[in-house]
Amino acid sequence: QVRLVESGGGLVQAGGSLRLSCTASPSIFSFKSMAWYRQTPENERDFVASITAGGTTNYGGSVSGRTTISKNIAKNTMDLRMDSVKPEDTGLYYCSGAIGGSLTRGQGTQVTVSS
């Protein structure tokens, strides 16, 4: 069964760091590319970061320079680390992955950045 499950959200103070994980089933290697998005309180969808099967990364303009997307092969996860978080980073973060010609996404994990 193809499934993505996010973890690691919660309340973060502005200026701090957040770390999220996306556990992939059946395997992280099943996905051609994977990405993080966030849905803002204004109900807008922001692209956060993506990583291809070959490890090429791409970042959204508002998070570039303070965000790292990576894969943890041992844990079968795709991870996101964001430093120097701001209140505008608040949102429902969800991961998505391209597999077998279709896209799969998780339910998301809420991140709230307090000022």
Image: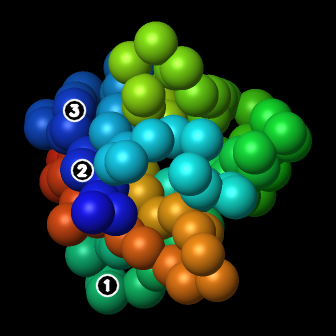
Q: Secondary structure at mark 3?
A: loop
Q: How is the image coloured?
A: rainbow
* Residue 67, horizontal then vertical, whole percent: 62, 33
Residue 103, given in percent of the width and then of the height, sits at 51, 79
Q: Residue 16 vs residue 102: left or right?
A: left
Label 1 sits on residue: 42
Tag 1 near tag 3, CB within 8 Å: no
Mark 1 or mark 2, earlier in chain: 2
Q: Is residue 53 left or right of residue 14?
A: right
Return the disc, 1 or 3, that comes first in the chain's sequence: 3
User: Which numbered dot is residue 5?
Assistant: 2
Q: Amino acid at mark 1?
A: Glu
Name the residue located 80 percent from the left edge and 35 percent from the top edge: 55
Work out whether residue 95 can be spotted. Answer: yes
Task: Kindly identify the residue that appears in the image at 57 percent across and 69 percent down.
Answer: 99
In this rendering, the answer to whether 72 lies above or below 42 is: above
Q: Residue furthest top?
A: 74
- The residue tagged with tag 1: helix, strand or loop? loop
Kind of residue sitting beneath label 2: Val
Q: Residues within 10 Å of mark 1 (few under 14, many from 20)?
A: few
Q: Quadrant of the C terminus?
A: top left
Residue at point 13%, 35% (across, down):
11
According to the picture, the residue beneath numbered tag 3 turns out to be 8
Q: Is residue 99 above or below residue 12?
A: below
Left/right of residue 10 with respect to residue 18 in the rendered view = left
- Displayed quadrant of residue 68: top right
How far apart in space, not on screen, are marks 1 and 2 (Cα)? 24 Å
